[in-house]
Image (spheres, rainbow, N blue to C red):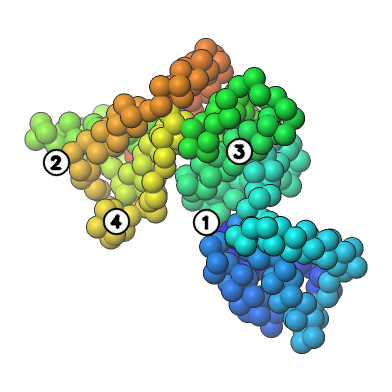
Amino acid sequence: LIHRDYEAIVLDFVTLEFIPKGTELTPILPVLARVFDQALEGGGAKNINFQELAGDLAQITFDYPFRIPPYFALIIRAIGVLEGIALVGDPDFAIVDEAYPYLSKMLLTDPSPRLRAALQYTIYGKEGVFDVERMVDILQNFETFKVNSQSSSGDQKGPILNSSTPSGSAMDLLVSEEGHFFRDFLVDEVVKSIDALTRQQAFLLADVLGLRNAFIPVLIPGAMQPLMPLAPRVTDEDRRIISNMTKVLSFLMGGRVSGGGSGENSDGDATQPDQPVLPLPLPDIFSMAMAARTANPNAVRDVMSYAPTVAGEVVPKIAYKLANRVASRLIREVFVGATPM
């Protein structure tokens, strides 16, 4: 629903027996798309009015082979009553928004393959593109769940922190055993960002020295091309990767995450991925430096307390994957003659 992948939602309805198996789904898809588009207009999935959505879905049953199973009808009625009571006291109440911290906790910690696939799909989407804002949103809601759990259980030993200041729960998760699945694909993004940032700065150095268009001979038997550019290729995708990790760093250091990460330049024109891009003068180095410089001191202290664990478990994995990534790219450049993204 977050990605507006209505084809997948229709298939879920078949699995949940809202739509009988074997039904032709083509006529139902645009109708459900209109219903969910209308439901999402009020501010996205978090602000869906459950009662209105249930009413719109019920209306479909009169015109299409769409039914609400008795079990779900009872759940929908119960949630509708609870939402109605809450709306009396708070007209801005949104039941999905209130449940999102718990959903984030389930996505991040539940070991079931179904929820792990859901977590990966939530962050990477249908196109497989890393969405840093969504990842940070999930981590912030996980922090909210931990804070709410602490306050509801009467444990007031530590301060109750707001959602813009990481309390350490996210870092606890990242270095814990139950967070290894989430940690693994976050490590992949860190490796990509280190690789991209290194090549970006090497490109800038070559450009400053006047060696941007210089070539070096390839003296390896079987090489596809006799010469290779001295300055590494830097693409718009590399810039997006670096920007994403800057936002992650800002979040962990107690800052706020700004919008962006869409893979576009500042002027809004997407750069073709197979064309070299001259980065602006050290934009990402400055962004990372500013993220660290403006960090919350308490957050920095909390993050540094995880340094031994990170050094012992995460850094070797990053080094191994980074070496593999660099070696793979060099082999492709030399023997295949193509540069991967």
Circle 3 packing at 10 Å, graded few (<14), some (14-19), many (20+), is many
The residue at 64%/20% (across/down) is 157
Residue bearing mark 4: 271
Element on which disc 2 rests: loop
Residue 24 shown left or right of residue 29 in the figure? right
Say if mark 2 contacts mark 1, CB within 8 Å.
no
Q: In the rendered structure, which disc, 3 or 4, sits on the residue that comes first in sequence? A: 3
Q: Quadrant of the N terminus?
A: bottom right
Disc on res. 213? 2
Residue type at numbered disc 2: Asn
Residue 238 shown left or right of residue 130 in the figure? left
Residue bearing mark 1: 127
Element on which disc 3 rests: helix
Residue bearing mark 3: 144
Residue type at numbered disc 1: Glu
Calculate the distance from the C-alpha at mark 3 to the C-alpha at mark 2.
51 Å
